[in-house]
Amino acid sequence: MDIETTRRNLLKGILAIPVLGALAAAVSPLMRFLKPTIKPLNYLQGGDLPRSAVPVEIDLSLMPKAFDAQAFTFTQINKEYTAIGTQTKDIPGYAVRLPTGEFAVYSRICPHLGCVFNYVPAPDDVAKGYNYRPDGPVFACPCHLSVFDIQQEGKVVSGPAPRPPRKFVYTVENNKLRITDLESGGVA
C-alpha cells in the first residue's frame, strides 16, 4: 500500500506541474489587461498618478503684503492608455499671501463645472457681481457665482460648488514659493 500511495502522489505531482505552469503563464497577460501601463512582471508597481512637468517657482518679493496674489500655470503630466503614453495639461492657479504669513495656493478650476474663477480682492466688487458680501478677498467663479473663502481653506461660502477648489502642494525655499504638485481629484 505504501508503494501505491507513493506512485499516486508522484503522478499527482507530475500532473500538477503543467496546470501550475498554465496558471503562471496566464497571470502576466491578465495583469497587463487590467492595468495597461504596468511593466512586465512588476505587479507591485504604484498607481498611475499625475506628476509635475516642471515645478513652478514664484519669487516672494512679488507678494510682500497680505492678500497679494500671483497667477501661475502649472503643467501636469498624466498617464494615458494610448500609443502616446502621456497627456500634458496646463492648470491655472493662484497663490495668495495670507495675513498669517502662510499661502493659499489653489487651482483656478471651479469644482462645480470646471470654469476658471478669479481672485477678487475687494468685498464691494464681490457684493456687486456675485450676490454675496465677504469679509475679505475671495476666489469667485463668474459662471455660476460660487464664492470661496481663502482664509477658511477655500470653503464654499456661496453658490453651487460642491467643495473647495483643489490645493497645490508647495514649499518655501530661498525666498521662493515652489509649487510641486496638485492634490488628486477631478472637477466635480
Image (cartoon, rainbow, N blue to C red):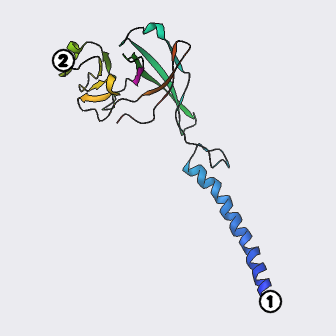
* Residue that protrudes farthest toward the right in the picture: 3
- Give the structural element (helix, strand or loop) at label 2: helix
Q: Is residue 180 left or right of residue 72?
A: right
Hey, which quadrant is residue 165 in on the image?
A: top left
Residue position for label 2: 127
- Lower position in the chain sequence, tag 1 or tag 2: 1
Residue position for label 1: 2
Extent of the magenta region: 101-107
Report the residue at 39% width, 17% height from top: 96
The overriding secondary structure of the stretch rendered in magenta is strand
- Decide which of 67, 5 is in the foreground and name it: 67
The quarter of the picture where the N terminus appears is bottom right
Instruction: Give how far apart the Cα atoms at labels 1 and 2 are.
Output: 93 Å
Mark 1 residue type: Asp
- Give the structural element (helix, strand or loop) at label 1: helix
* Residue that protrudes farthest toward the front in the picture: 100
Against 106, residue 7 (above or below) is below
104 falls in the magenta region: yes
Q: Is residue 131 left or right of residue 181?
A: left
Residue 126 rendering spot, x and y as whole percentages? 22, 17
Report the residue at 28% width, 32% height from top: 161
Mark 2 residue type: Ala
Q: Is residue 113 left or right of residue 63?
A: left
